Amino acid sequence: MSLVDAPARKAAKLALLLLKRTCTYQRAGDPTENISTGAVTPNYTNATLRCALTRVKRDLVDGTLVRATDMMVLLDPISFETAYGAGAAPAQEDRIVIAGETLQTVRPLPVSGGEQWALHKVIVRR
């Protein structure tokens, strides 16, 4: 971690600690196909991460990709990297489960604090 990373990561960590919420992040992997039926089943790797659920800011709503009914999940980058490796970032194929509700990733918006991710913002949809 460089000196530039420290303040951004510290601020993100404090914000997530205040909310004390966890979620299950489901990272999409290679799907499996049943040869006899042709059915394709997605595979997910689950990890429990610290997170916060907020509303999407109006300036991000474009009516096409991001809708007014979408929400934003803030993910702790340290627990994300612990689960999925350094430099890993959320992807559009991933899902997030919060309080038993599965949310589909619409658009990941990682926030860099220098050399490392300071915070992962993910726009999600029910």
Image (cartoon, rainbow, N blue to C red):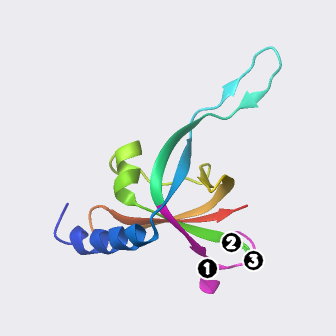
Question: Disc 2 and disc 3: Cα gap in Å?
Answer: 6 Å
The type of residue carrying mark 2 is Val
Residue 79 locus on image (x, y percent):
38, 52
Mark 1 in CB contact with mark 2 (< 8 angstroms): yes
Which residue is labeled 3 in the image? 63
| Residue occupying image coordinates x 21% and y 72% | 4
| Residue occupying image coordinates x 59% and y 32% | 30
The type of residue carrying mark 3 is Gly
The type of residue carrying mark 1 is Leu
What element does badge 2 sit on? loop
Quadrant where the C terminus is found in the figure = bottom right
Quadrant hosting residue 43: top right
Q: Please state which of residues 44 and 109 is positioned toward the viewer in this rendering.
A: 44
Task: Mark 3: give few (<14), some (14-19) or many (20+) Cα within 10 Å.
Answer: few
* Residue 70 belongs to magenta span: no
Which residue is labeled 1 in the image? 60
Q: Residue furthest left?
A: 3
Residue 107 locus on image (x, y percent):
60, 63
Q: Residue furthest bottom?
A: 59
Q: Residue furthest top?
A: 36
What element does badge 3 sit on? loop
The magenta stretch is 51-66
Q: Is residue 70 visible?
A: yes
Relative horizontal placement of residue 62, taking residue 77 as reference (left or right) = right
Quadrant hosting residue 120: bottom left
Mark identifier at residue 41: none
Question: Count the marks: how many?
Answer: 3
Question: Disc 3 and disc 1: Cα gap in Å?
Answer: 9 Å
Quadrant where the N terminus is found in the figure = bottom left
Which residue is labeled 2 in the image? 66
Residue 70 locus on image (x, y percent):
69, 70
| Residue occupying image coordinates x 60% and y 82% | 57
